[in-house]
Amino acid sequence: MRKGPWITALSLGMGLFFSACVVRLVGVSPVAAGKTLLRGGMGDASAWSETLVKATPLLLVAGGLCVAFRARYWNIGAEGQICAGTVACTWFALHMPPMPAIFSVPFLLFTGGLAGAGLGAVSGALRAYRGVNEIITTIMMNYVALHAVGYLVEGPMRDPQGYLPESAEVPSWVLLPSLSHARIHAGFPLAIAALLLLYVLLKKTVWGFTWEAVGHNPRAAAFAGIRVRRTLLSVAAWSGAMAGVAGAVEVLGIHFRLREMISSGYGFTAIAVALLGRSHPVGVLFAGVLLAAFQVGADQMERELSVPSSVVLFLQALIVLSVLAGETVRSRWEETRGGGEG
Amino acid sequence: MTGVTKRFGAVAANEAIDLDVRAGEMHAILGENGAGKSTLVSVLYGLIRPDRGEICWKGSPVRIRHPRHALRLGIGMVHQHFMLVPQLTVAENVMLGVREKAWPLLDKRTVRNRLEEVSLRFGLRVDPEKNVEELSVGEQQRAEILRILYRGAELLVLDEPTALLTPQEGESLFHVLNQLKSQGRAVLFITHRLGEVRDWADRVTVLRKGKRVAVLEGKGKDPKELAQLMMGGGKADDLRVEGRSRSGRERSSGDPLLEVRGIRLKGARPLRDISLKVGAGEILAVAGVDGNGQRELAECLDGRRRPETGEILLEGKSLIGQGPRAAARRGLGHVPQDRRGEGVVLEYDLSRNAALRRFLEKPFSRFGFLRHEAMREEAERMVNVYDIQAPGPHTRVKHLSGGNVQKLILARELSTGPKVLIANHPTRGLDIASRNFVWRRLDEAREEDRGVLLISADMDEIMALADRILVLFDGAVAGELFQEEATPSKLGLLMGGAGNA
């Protein structure tokens, strides 16, 4: 009856087909490559653990991007906002008095979120009140934040006892609890909870209604009495906050200190996740886990089949492109057919 | 042009229109908004393909496929909004799209020399080295004309050429056009200003509702006669809303529901000291040609804009600076001009749009949570009461026809029982049935002792509904009439800015 999902599936299949062709060109059997990829990313418990560890920041960041993208605010600055979150979280972790994790961890996540929101809000305010294109400012803010982290770990926040440019380790009483012997930590259930909350916000509350109204038709929103500028500012801050929390989670769950490249591109991959997931929390959950598994499996492929992992990133881009192309076809198709459900 | 017909859906924008323009002639096309003027010249310039009809150029039939084709034939058009690149100089703008001998290299010198020659010949003084953004509007227009002449246009088509000009600039524009005429070029211009036809046009073609109603000698024509032709005199009375009860009832004597005192707004489309009053059980029509301040006035009234000076009172209390939500809550409904662009969110379904104005309030939300059920019920109620043709409350509004969208908006704006309803071009583009429906509702709103502010450019609508009529011209009140004393020609004169003529 509904053909929408089929078009998505079809375009995904086409993306996989193109990927197979590319793998063939590199000189590896696509079947073997696919098997390795799947096994590497989802083959056993440790593979899953690694995948979910990678998925955690993706889900958090992409969840925030859902909010922004629904309001047609194109925040490309999640990478920088993650950095802001890592810095704030680490600083407070190193300077706060000892207290049980039940208090310290939420507080530190909050500081990370606040820092991300602050950075995001700068671009948001420029867009809302000065009409500056947010794509440009958020991209530029990425550089500001990345290099600021570089400076901090070389200078003010560097651990004087350490050999590497990184901060001292945060105390053990602020860490996110681990879930098993592998690296997976409490950040993943947190991300799931965040997506759940997001779902409620988007579908059941006046905020979701407002965000989407502004995204679809800012003039009608203004006519109806929605404060469009303030809404843009708030979605910028929201999406920044989620990225900041993701940064804090990485510090408290994986790295335990501030260093460069904590994010290593999560902020950008999350854009693909949000787009693939059609800015919907459930879609984001699947897309986020899928792309995380891809990345983990890619490392496996590199080790076993000596396929450079850059090829896998190439394939990832190819698949994202096909699915997005499919989306375009789909929406146009729905357009001509008419009478769709709201 | 003979028998040009163009239909958009069920609406005939042009119906079997004939038009002929002779060399060395200044020809005006006169008509109200929506009379089909722009459609007709768009056909001529190859922007729109006619459904029927024929164009003869220098005696032989042609099919003009696109604007470049029109230009090649020697037909050039100056749009109301100029098509110049502001960052480039006049000479560079002229060069755009022209192939000189040196192509693909730019031959600036040749262009500049020829440009100088052309501008000397026609007395069009523009500095070719100046950036377009530094020029005044009048100069930009001259640059635009120059560009077309440079390309060898023999027929110049101008769409409302004086709309953005000061009276002095307008005057000098027509002197230039006269000069072109005397050198054998033909000029065809669209206007709704009667004075321009009287003073400058050799002949005038009058359009009304997509049909040609007259071709006359232009110069020295009595504006009154032209206005009558343009508006369609006299027969408006037959179009009265059925069952309208009391054209002669005494006017409401109590305090006005809505009062506007001397609001001013700066900007490209300013408002100059507008005052008005709407009483209970009264329809005040604000008439005028589009772009004379109606949109700005409406946005000030509903709280989206803040006038620089002046006061807006609803039931005696100020509305200024309170924003659209407060205005709506206090009893101001508004059916906006651009119903699809600002009245609804097309991607939202009926139920969400039904609640769009009040989704932050009970019953549509509580503690920040939406109550979809209440929204759905509201939408269903509107669908039933207003007979909205839609598959169901979860149909997206983008799939509804214009008439049904308008019914939805009207239902929404009346659902709160507003004290005052602003209806901004409420029936533009609607079919007859929907139009009558909207008219009846507006009349009912008056019966229920609401105040109705009807902003319209449609003469029939104004004559059928209004108790009083206020005419806007150039951001100011050009005149105010009671319904009994209003005639289409009187209104036409005021709307055309010839109120004192």
Image (cartoon, rainbow, N blue to C red):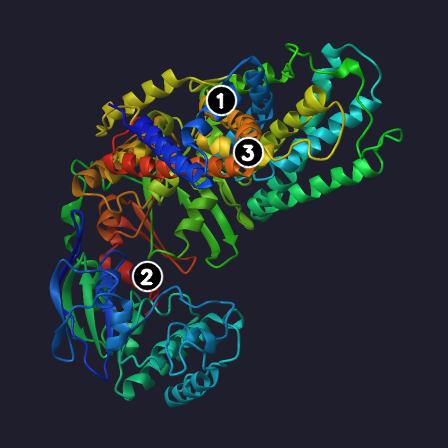
Residue under label 1, please give it.
A285
Q: How many marks?
A: 3
Quadrant in the picture for the N terminus of chain B: bottom left
Inter-mark Cα distance, 2 to 3: 83 Å
Which quarter of the picture shows residue B439?
top left
Residue under label 3, please give it.
A306
Quadrant in the picture for the C terminus of chain B: bottom left
Q: Residues within 10 Å of mark 3 (few under 14, many from 20)?
A: few
Q: Residues within 10 Å of mark 2 (few under 14, many from 20)?
A: many
The answer to whether the residue labelled 1 contacts the one labelled 2, judged by CB atoms less than 8 Å apart, is no
Q: Is residue B212 visible?
A: yes
Would residue B104 appear left or right of A161 to someone viewing this image?
left
Percent from the top left, x then y, of residue B483?
Answer: 27, 49
Q: Is residue B318 visible?
A: no
Indicate the amino acid at tag 2: Leu
Q: Which mark is residue B494?
A: 2
Q: Chain of mark 1?
A: A
Inter-mark Cα distance, 1 to 2: 63 Å
Q: Nearer the viewer, mark 1 or mark 2?
A: 1
Q: Residues within 10 Å of mark 1 (few under 14, many from 20)?
A: many
Q: Chain of mark 2?
A: B
Residues at discs 1 and 2 both on one chain: no
